[in-house]
Image (tube, rainbow, N blue to C red):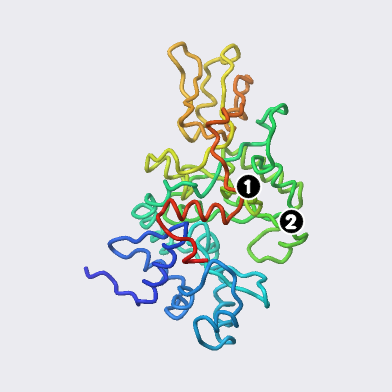
Amino acid sequence: MTAPQYADEYRRLAARLDALPNGFPSTPDGLELALLARLFTPEEAALAAQLRLTLETPAALAARIGGDARALRDTLKSLANRGLIEVGRAPGGLGFALMPFVVGFYENQNTRLDAELARLIEVYFKKAFPSVLNVEPQFHRVIPIGETIPVAIDVQPFESATAIVDQAKAWGVIECICRKQKALIGEACGHPLEVCMIFSSVPGAFDHAGEVRALTHEEALATLRLAAEAGLVHTVGNRQDHTTYICNCCTCSCGILRGVAELGMANVVARAAFESVVDAALCTSCEACAAWCQFDALALDEDGIMAVNRQRCVGCGQCVLHCDQGALSLARRPEHEIKPVPATLHDWQAQRAEARGHDLADVL
């Protein structure tokens, strides 16, 4: 069968997206072009391919690339309303910017995701994503379940899920697009669906936000607990100033954590600054903790005592939460093993662009 032909506009947008630090790898059969064709018209793709990561007003964009500012604004607003590009305040008014595929506009497509798109995403994930999942700094970083951290341990705000919730002024929850995608191809994992949490520093930001269900502070903490009790792993954007979302992930559906279970890649997610430790005197060898570990980091040793594989442990705290004997706890890793967390999004982008052999200045 002859492969479908796609407009050059999609090729230019695909190349532009792959030039971003996040990456958008190509495949021999052009799956990345098929994805873009499902979401963008050729005209929209041509415009998006000329955007930068820095917000620009339609007037500034028209001055740079040509065209009528009013017509550009209408197209940009349409793209932004569909979650395909960034929108925000820029010098001179409302600005627009290019958004990565992941983490980016894919996660905004809950209302447009159908079985056909879900199947396309699945094949693209398996064929293309290994090449960007193992790049450091990773997309996501694990943060432990709050109640599993001993009170005596010094914890930075960016290391604590509860602290991120507490610092926000508005809270919301949406369906996990990864679990929705897997369900649409007949591979639902059974974990809770409505547990992707988003935050804002603006009070009431999600009160009229469409697919987002606004939460109170107490409801946000309850959602966090529900996710933890379901065995899900808290992950956030891999930078210190990240406060906009907490993903509650599983290795069976999460597009990132599946790299561990399906691709055998141990470093697809940045580990927490903590690790599990076992009190041998309290361990009854029941193995309940191992059943909750999604990273195969726990196994009985030759003496029948639970042992932790430190290389596989990500410090999520699930084993601690589900050990009725109190034999497991989290301890801070040795400082030389804790990788510095990029301070800002720009720092993360610069480090990742360098790791991928790209010049960040080309897309800013």
In the drawing, does residue 183 fall left or right of residue 320?
left
Q: Nearer the viewer, residue 312 or 23?
A: 23
Dot 2 falls on a residue whose secondary structure is strand
Residue extending farthest left: 1
Residue 221 to residue 276: above or below: below
Q: Which residue in the protein does label 2 denote?
A: 170
Kindly identify the residue that appears in the image at 37 percent across and 43 percent down: 263
Q: Which residue in the protein does label 1 denote?
A: 240
In the drawing, does residue 314 fall left or right of residue 149?
left
Kindly identify the residue that appears in the image at 39 percent across and 72 percent down: 12
Q: Quadrant of residue 74?
A: bottom right
| Residue 289 visible in image | yes
Q: Quadrant of residue 29?
A: bottom left
Q: The residue under label 1 is which amino acid type?
A: Gln
Residue 214 x/y as whole percent: 71, 58
Dot 1 falls on a residue whose secondary structure is loop
Q: Residues within 10 Å of mark 2 (few under 14, many from 20)?
A: many
Question: Are circles 1 and 2 on residues that touch, CB within 8 Å?
Answer: no
Residue 142 x/y as whole percent: 56, 41
Q: Nearer the viewer, residue 216 or 154?
A: 154
Residue 204 to residue 295: above or below: below
Residue extending farthest bottom: 68
